[in-house]
Image (cartoon, coloured by chain):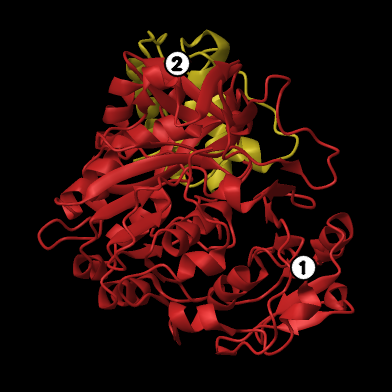
Amino acid sequence: MSVRLTIIEQMELIAREHGKILAPLKEDLVLADCGLDSLGFAVLVARLEDKLGIDPFTAAEDAVFPVTLGDFVKVYEHGRR
Amino acid sequence: MAGVDAPSLRAAIANAKAPRFFWDRAASIRFTDVGRGTSFGARLAELAGRAVLLATASQLTSALALIELDGIARRIVILPPDAAAEHLGAVIAIAGVDAAVIDDGTPPNGALALPIRVPCAPTIVPMRASPLPRVHTEWVLMTSGTTGVPKMVVHDLESLTAAMRASSPADGATVWGTFYDIRRYGGLQIYLRAVCGGASLVLSSAGEPVADRLARLAQHGVTHLSGTPSQWRRALMTPAIRAIVPRYVRLSGEIADQAILDSLRAAFPHATIGHAYASTEAGVAFDVNDGLAGFPADYIGTVRDGVGMKILDGSLRIRSGAAAAGYVGGEQTLTDAAGFVDTGDMVERHGDRFYFAGRKGGIINIGGLKVHPEEIEAVINRHPLVRMSLVRPKRSPITGSVVVADVVLEAERPGAAHRAARQIELKDDILKLCREALPRHKVPAAISFVPALDVAATGKLLRRQG
């Protein structure tokens, strides 16, 4: 499964588990408006570390959290290379 | 205080209808020989009236030395086997130690260069000297603090035996065993139960594998066996456990959750399974023998067996004759104005029982919400394929931290292989259990299967700051 699909699958799963409704997951969707709260994102990052083997945010000292879904996916795609 | 009438340990070991022994891996020592002899050669008199550091490596020499020092030394400072070498100098200075008891395994340490160093050997020679004057002996135990010089807690034989009922039959047929080291409070309780209660005791030896220890416990016909829930979970993973048939199984030192109580019930259908609550400072407060986790709500607010309990700011407070007298040096106070010790153990009431939620200092903060790792572990441990688990914080760039779980599965059984595909399914299954029982911030963000979890020398699950 691609990095992008893994991320989207996990976002949908966490939204279901947490009883949240996700906005349509488009490239330019602002993450703050996507429907997951901060706990949801924290869980997402931990789950993605489990699935993809990387945590690009905790690994870097000065990690900048991406603004859009497209940026978020790129951080993981970049981190995997 | 109601307790075993134990004027001295020397008197207690004489009490038996049948032969009694200390056993370790290498030796067996008969109590009647200890009663007539000495393990200090001819040097016990040098220790009379002194503050003695018990720095022996083996539990057996410690067991022998305690019998001889009780009522002879003014103070016995009991050094746990995992005590940090760099704190030894401070311990000796603070406790005013002026003599040491060592054995041939005591590691060299400059701080031990005391004027009086008496070796203790697991060989008993007849006592030739005349009896020494008896004194009141302080027993000093160390707490299992994680950093800095350990706190030194002052007990005496009366407080240490206050929780033991005088009714223990001195039939010589009881054989105690413990997974603890007898130089910490939990293990010392078992040592004293054996010595004062007419029993024998199987001691563990350093570096002894769990399977070998279980085989020795079986060989000596252990009837009463004690350990922490973590030690019991490990023992249950060892096939050698099937060789022992204890009548009494005791847990203390950590929260006994329903899963471990049920597992022990299944393994030992005819045994009494009890969990005890004790701490080095507060002493033994109560035993619960109904097979259920937690304790009845009416324990709070009433005085039972001389023990009073109350809850303040969510944590359990205990006032009891089994509590310590204070700390050495006396700079820190042990009790509040009304004489209660704050145990730092948080309890929550559900229905007519109180349950232990976790340590006051062990709370994980998830975006402002407080989580006790132990309550999540208790849920994970309910899964039939889980043997033990550790919930820990994981730093998160967004919420401060999330909780993740390391899980040890039951030993693989034929036909139930935990293969990779099965593991994903199992993770989902455990998470489902958590989601049903816990609010979402307490559901682990990730689960890892690990072959084993670290258990500290104290027998407790090792928790690192995340």
Where residue B261 sits: x, y (%)?
28, 42
Q: Nearer the viewer, residue B229 or A33?
A: B229
Name the side, left or right, on which B84 lies relative to B199.
Answer: right
Q: Colour of chain B?
A: red
Residue depicted at x 80% and y 48%: B328
Quarter of the rendering containing residue B245 = bottom left
Name the side, left or right, on which A35 lies relative to B113.
Answer: left
Where residue B61 sits: x, y (%)?
58, 78
Where residue B355 sits: x, y (%)?
40, 25
Q: Which chain letter goes with mark 1?
A: B
Residue B179 vertical placement versus B325 (above, below): below
Q: CA distance from mark 2 to mark 1?
A: 73 Å
Circle 2: residue type: Lys
Residue depicted at x 86% and y 38%: B331
Instruction: Assess disc 2: are there few (<14), some (14-19) or many (≥20) residues with their C-alpha within 10 Å of its C-alpha.
Output: few
Label 1: state its secondary structure: strand
For the C terminus of chain B, the quadrant is: top right
Chain in yellow, by letter, is A
Residue B404 vertical placement versus B356 (above, below): below
Where residue B179 sits: x, y (%)?
43, 62
Note whether residue B304 is visible: yes
Residue at the spot of label 2: A26
Outermost left residue: B415
Badge number at residue B52: 1
Q: Nearer the viewer, mark 2 or mark 1?
A: 1
Q: Which chain letter goes with mark 2?
A: A
Q: Nearer the viewer, residue A78 or B136?
A: B136
Circle 1: residue type: Val
Badge number at residue B336: none
Residue depicted at x 53% and y 58%: B188
Label 2: state its secondary structure: loop
